[in-house]
Image (cartoon, grey):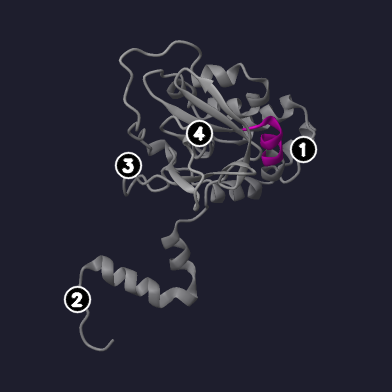
Amino acid sequence: MTSSINRLKTPGLLVLSAILIAISSCNKDLEQFAETPVEPPSGLALGETLAASADDALFYKILTKANKVPLLNDKTKSFTIFSPSNSAVKTFVTAVSQGAVPPNAPDAVVEGFIATYLSSGLCDTLVSYHILPQKVPVANIPDTFANFAYPTLFNPASALSALARLDAYTSRRANGVWDNNIPVIAPDMMAANGVIHRIAAVSVPPSQLLLQRIATDTTLSFLMAAIIRADSGANLTGTG
């Protein structure tokens, strides 16, 4: 197994880098929506709760690599975490490793891959997209159409704005609760400073912003030109 992982091709991590925009080191914590409690609540904090949960162990390893555990253990702040199960993290690692780590690999092998091949920046990007800077139990998720957008901690364009956060799209329907169309399999695991919803798959942030998609699509060149002209503030003159 070790030799298989050692033969991991560089393109595998390049694919991951393209999927996860690893610029989160510049991110600032999004202002909390909930009021800061006068006294920190008692009980285990979110990070401590995940550390004690056997089926969140692999996601906790990613949180640790991303250096997000101290933030999640801050009881003066409130968060919601959509935590992929161990099985979900294994499926993700299998895809990222291009099959070098099989889905049935022991936890220790998956943990070794996370420690060796996933950078702290990539881990930070990944976990930030799974965290909301407010406490959102299932009962607070609207059951109306369309899916409700909550801002996450992930900022794909921190150079433009510290508040340019990507949204997570949650929904509550008769057939269950969903995060970005991923089913929540264990909702409302309460901690002192927030709530954890376990999900059935890793939620990967979009690889491109809308403007990037438009800029690289030759069939949308006129639209791109119009956006550039609008951003310039220049008045349209002539017939060009």
Q: Quadrant of residue 231?
A: bottom left
Horizontal side, residue 46 vs residue 175: left or right: left
Horizontal side, residue 24 vs residue 190: left or right: left
Disc 1 from disc 3: Cα separation? 37 Å
Q: Which residue is mark 3?
A: 162
Where, quadrant-wise, is the N terminus in this rendering? Answer: top right
Could you tell which of marks 1 and 3 lies nearer the N-terminus?
1
Nearer to me, 101 or 1: 101
Dot in front, 4 or 1:
4
Disc 4 from disc 1: Cα separation? 34 Å
Residue 87 covered by magenta stretch: yes
Judging from the image, what secondary structure is the residue with disc 2 in? loop
Could you tell which of marks 1 and 2 lies nearer the N-terminus?
1
* Residue drawn at x 35%, y 29% as measured from the top left: 34
> As shown in the figure, which amino acid type bears the numbered disc 4?
Ala
> As shown in the figure, which amino acid type bears the numbered disc 1?
Pro
* Residue drawn at x 22%, y 79% as measured from the top left: 236
Q: Which residue is mark 4?
A: 139
Judging from the image, what secondary structure is the residue with disc 3 in? loop
20, above or below 40, in the image: below
Q: Which residue is mark 2?
A: 235
Q: Which residue is mark 1?
A: 103
> As shown in the figure, which amino acid type bears the numbered disc 3?
Ala
Disc 3 from disc 2: Cα separation? 30 Å
- The residue range painted magenta reads 84-92
Dot in front, 4 or 3:
4
Disc 1 from disc 2: Cα separation? 57 Å
Could you tell which of marks 4 and 1 lies nearer the N-terminus?
1
Picture coordinates of residue 133, whole percent (x, y): 41, 33
Could you tell which of marks 4 and 3 lies nearer the N-terminus?
4
84, above or below 227, in the image: above
